[in-house]
Image (cartoon, grey):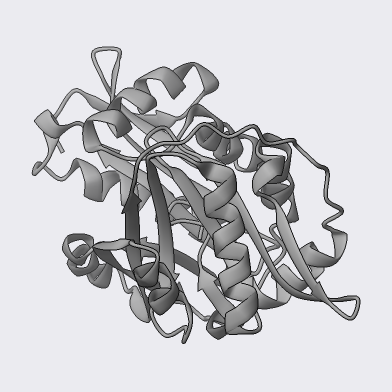
Amino acid sequence: MDAGIELRLMATKDIPEAMRLKDVAGWNQTAGDWERFLSASPDGCFVAEEKGRVIGTSATIAYEGRFAWIGMVVVDHLHRGNGLGTALLERAIQYLDSCGLPCMKLDATPQGKLLYKKFGFVSEYEIDRWMLKRQPEKKRVGKPRVEIGDVLRLDREVFGADRSMLLRSLAEEAPEFTLVAKHEAEIAGYAFGRRGSRADHLGPWMANSRDVAAALLDKFLNISGRELVFVDCVRANPWAVPLVKARGFEFSRPLTRMFRGTNRYPGQPEKLCAILGPEFG
């Protein structure tokens, strides 16, 4: 890392500069996503600063003390290749180690996977991003409030830890994307979504049958109406990829879920059609 670059805690005032970095990188995150990290982990989000300008970020979030997540590792394109990304990752790992968390996770691109292996991360399962590009269609959608208490309890089992604060935040921001399917009063599936800066993003998307998965997907697409839609499918799920392919989605990029430490709470990823997203898990 070059001399003159300082690593420090991220603050709310840094969000506009962080948005600039992610826009250059072509990411889909919003200012609200950064706010979620800062709200959940004010001591675990970092920036690299040079001459008063933010040139890199990393962020963490802990889930119920069971494991933590590392995301938002992005570096200004003019400063790549000089070890800054590695330094930001190291700072995040050091912070999580100091918290005594037994496990940390992240979703790695093929390029990042090699770096993460050097820090002791190992592969857990594979994820593929799929993208739908279509003619935009204006939708007049109401914003119903769905009771999600039972969904949050089920998601804790599926994800492996409580992330109810995060999912409630998504439901507040985009209630039209908060979908629940029931069979004989039991939850058969659920989905959440975000209106990202580039695309609407479906996830998490969980279903206990192909028919339920298809119904949730179709409802999400009908509500969205946006030109671009992203979904990060768990490759091992038997329904997700065939369903999105049948609706015109195209493969975008692979990701690998990786962990470092003792993965005592892997959840039930086989039940997930799609994850929340690589920034949050």
Counting from the top left corner in percent of width and height, residue 82 is at 10, 41
Which residue is nearer to you in this view: 268 or 190? Answer: 190
Residue visible at 40% across and 64% down in the picture: 247
Task: Please determine whether, in this image, residue 42 is positioned above or below residue 235.
Answer: above
Apparent side of residue 40 relative to residue 183 in the rendered image (left or right): left
Determine the residue positioned at 74% across, 55% down: 164
- Looking at the picture, how far across and down is residue 273, in whole percent? 52, 73
Q: Residue at x 40, y 52 (%)?
A: 230
Q: Is residue 18 above or below residue 80?
A: above
- Which residue is found at the position 46% from the left and 66% from the top? 105
Q: Position of residue 256 (x, y in %)?
A: 33, 71
Q: Nearer the viewer, residue 121 or 191?
A: 191
Quadrant in which the N terminus is drawn: top left
Residue 210: x percent and y percent?
57, 82
Asked if residue 61 can be seen in this view, the reply is: no
Is residue 247 among what the camera can see? yes
Give above or below for 99 relative to 10. below
95 horizontally vs 209: left or right: left
189 left or right, relative to 238: right
Residue 161 lies left or right of residue 75; in this view the side is right
Q: Quadrant of residue 59?
A: top left
Extreme-top residue of the structure: 52
